[in-house]
């Protein structure tokens, strides 16, 4: 009897988030724009005829930051539960699972035909830059949207926190959004996305009560420093370009 | 650069439908009960702690009735469109796709611990008996249920047809549901499921206007003969046990 299955990589995800820190914990929480660049032979426009009539797609991807499991680990500690309660891996969306497969619903923004090769522009992905893609299917509302589904330990979207930026930070962002000469310049949409990402509070659960400790989220080539102050607000305090 | 990914088979689907004919065209259309029997080491109850708090699961499975593609075929003819219009494979849920991966949302009925091995009892699957399972994840309503999603050529569930049974058929079912000695005896729930399956009209699209032609759907070890009459009703006409 066959014990495994081989699936081809059909494309790669390109995102402003090159590190796991800051990646939304589920799809559909943050309006972050990104794209999937298909690889040959899967990049032919023929393979996408009709897809633009769907608003959302299912993306199946490889959790490539995790090594394939050598021994099966049946339990994980979901960040959602503070990282100190164990659950069965199949009761979670943890990326540490037997199949290195992630599953994300994303909004389809545009199907670009770039010199005969397809690029899918999407919104809401919870995948890091460089993620290998193994399948793309349309979201079919009549079978996939189950409004009365009961969702165990994750009954609703995680609470978002208030985000503010210091005057210094605001000036740094203004400088970055006013230049168009730098290929890594930010748009106002980027700044909005950064604020949405930080509002999700990417800090580890066990540090979420920590006041004054600096954390850094990389967005494109910019390291965004932020910390929670006594007021419970996540303050964006500095932005540094990196190479 | 890596071009493929290997995923383990973690269980097998067990269903009264051992043939593709009759399988619902999407999950969630028919209240058919079935189960997934996990295989070692993935069958440990530890791996399922917390899963019973979710009403629905995502099942990722192997479309094992299709051979792996040797050359990439970018287009398919969805049955939904009558089988005569081509669409890009990534705009469809066709099982003829580069990754032999199917994706189905199912209702979780019960997590059975049978002598220390887990069996998941589910409802609504569109998978045939013997389907290899590669991943199970909880359905998370706040990210997965998108009520306003626009679903291209499949905006709503396929229309169901009226189903009736002849007096002879009714007698045959009565005989099968009244016996409990035969291990393949039918329950009243089975008969209801059979009627729901036929109401989906499993006949190929190009034959759906055919009057009087007999089709046979196998359910457990019973071949159910049905045909559409002039009245447009799908009439169940005979049931034969097979070995």
Image (spheres, coloured by chain):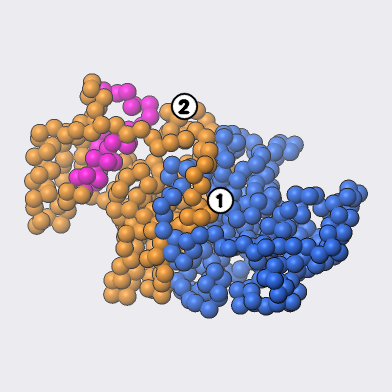
Chain colours: A blue, B orange
Residue sticking out furthest to the front: A231
Q: In the rendered structure, does residue B201 fall within the stretch colored magenta?
A: yes
Q: Is residue A230 above or below residue B208?
A: below
A112 horizontally vs B230: left or right = right
Percent coordinates x, y for residue A49 in the rendering: 59, 34
Badge 1 element: strand
Q: Nearer the viewer, mark 1 or mark 2?
A: 1
Residue B64: say if magenta: no
Task: Tell me the number on the disc at residue B84.
Answer: 2
Q: Which residues are magenta?
A: B190-219
Q: Position of residue B23 (x, y in %)?
A: 34, 43
- Residues at marks 1 and 2, common chain? no
Q: Position of residue B233 (x, y in %)?
A: 24, 28
Pick the front one: B148 or B214? B148
Relative vertical location of residue A64 with respect to residue B162 in this rendering, above or below: below
The image quadrant that residue A152 belongs to is: bottom left
Asked which secondary structure carries label 2, the reply is loop
The residue wearing badge 1 is A105
């Amino acid at each position: 009897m066959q014990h495994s299955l081989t699936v081809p990589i059909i494309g790669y995800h390109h995102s402003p988030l090159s590190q796991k820190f800051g990646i939304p914990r589920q799809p559909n929480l943050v309006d972050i724009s990104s794209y999937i660049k298909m690889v040959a032979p899967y990049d032919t426009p023929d393979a996408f005829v009709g897809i633009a009539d769907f608003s959302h797609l299912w993306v199946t991807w490889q959790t490539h930051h995790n090594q394939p499991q050598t021994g099966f680990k049946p339990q994980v500690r979901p960040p959602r539960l503070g990282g100190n309660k164990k659950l069965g891996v199949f009761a979670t969306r943890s990326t540490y699972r037997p199949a290195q497969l992630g599953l994300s619903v994303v909004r389809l923004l545009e199907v670009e035909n770039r010199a005969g090769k397809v690029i899918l522009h999407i919104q809401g992905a919870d995948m890091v830059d460089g993620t290998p893609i193994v399948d793309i299917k349309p979201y079919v509302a009549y079978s996939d949207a189950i409004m009365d589904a009961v969702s165990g330990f994750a009954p609703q979207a995680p609470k978002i926190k208030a985000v503010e930026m210091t005057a210094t930070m605001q000036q740094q962002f203004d400088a970055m959004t006013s230049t168009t000469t730098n290929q890594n310049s930010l748009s106002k949409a980027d700044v909005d996305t950064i604020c949405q990402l930080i509002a999700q509070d990417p800090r580890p659960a066990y540090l979420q009560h920590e006041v004054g400790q600096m954390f850094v989220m990389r967005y494109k080539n910019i390291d965004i420093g932020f910390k929670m102050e006594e007021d419970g607000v996540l303050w964006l305090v500095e932005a540094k370009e990196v190479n």
